Image (cartoon, helix red, strand yellow):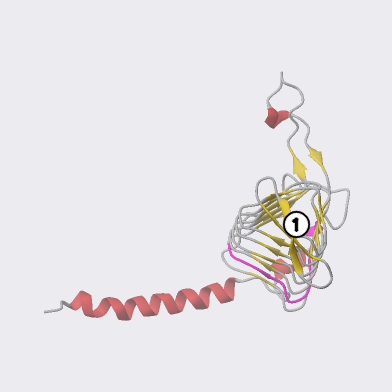
Amino acid sequence: MAGPWSLLRPVLGGIVRGASGVAHRLAAIGPRDRRARRFGGFGEGSCISWPTGYVFGERWIHLGDDTLVGSHVTLSAGMVPGQQMVTDPVVRIGDRCLIGRGSAIVGHLSIDIGDDVFTGMNVYITDQNHGYEDVDAPIGRQLPSEDPVTIGSDSWIGSGAVILPGARIGRHVVVGANSVVRGEIPDFSVVVGVPGRVVRRHDGAAWRREGEAT
């Protein structure tokens, strides 16, 4: 026969889950919230989900309209809070974008993400690399190098992908899950692997495998 706890637990669980859902919606950051005023731009209809990740340098981060940033997403401009940046914006995310849960966008010079860009979970995008040229100094103490990153509109970045400094990803590009991308990626292409390589392109008539005869 069921005991009192086994009968009560589903009821209490439902109450807790309902309250948690309400709390998450209330704690999300929207354009009317005081926290949104810290950002260089925070578009209408945009939202940063709760719980937020590590967010700083908001002054140099611009969000477009109707963009959703998932929970536990890191958004940063600079190495430390309060750092004065030399470019503005350092991080720009366009309209109607979706940044997947657990992702990180870490900007130091320029990361520009177009409109209607969706990412899967745990995507990492950065425009800075550690220096390693001096073999007599720890890598973590050497001056880093920076190279702007752009991601064209209408693109999809699969879960676990890493977008490295200097990546210039074109429009309507698919980046496969867990790929590592840098350099020039043409419009209307599919890139996969480590390092990322183009495996399909749209030639204006149809999608074709790289090297396939038309």
Residue 24 coordinates in the image, percent (x, y)? 54, 72
Q: Quadrant of residue 151?
A: bottom right
Q: Is residue 121 left or right of residue 4?
A: right
For the C terminus, give its image quadrant. bottom right
Kind of residue at badge 1: Glu
Q: Nearer the viewer, residue 117 or 21?
A: 117
Q: Nearer the viewer, residue 71 or 182?
A: 182
Residue 213 coordinates in the image, percent (x, y)? 79, 61
Residue 76 coordinates in the image, percent (x, y)? 72, 53
Residue farthest toward the left in the current orientation of the protein: 1
Task: Please say if 88 is above or below 133.
Answer: below
Q: Is residue 47 left or right of residue 167?
A: left
Q: Check disc 1: other Cα within 10 Å, few if <14, some if 14-19, many if 20+.
A: some
Task: Please say if 171 is above or below 137.
Answer: below
Residue at 63% across / 59% down in the picture? 73
Task: Please say if 127 is above or below 46.
Answer: above
Which residue lies under the disc numbered 1? 210
Magenta region includes residue 62: yes
**Residue span colored magenta:** 58-71
Q: Nearer the viewer, residue 17 or 154?
A: 154
Magenta region includes residue 68: yes
Residue 208 coordinates in the image, percent (x, y)? 75, 64
Residue at 75% across / 32% down in the picture? 131
Q: Quadrant of residue 203?
A: bottom right
Residue at 21% across / 76% down in the picture? 6
Q: Is residue 121 left or right of residue 12?
A: right
Q: Nearer the viewer, residue 180 or 34?
A: 180
Residue farthest toward the top in the current orientation of the protein: 136
Circle 1 — which element?
loop
Q: How many marks?
A: 1
For the N terminus, give its image quadrant. bottom left
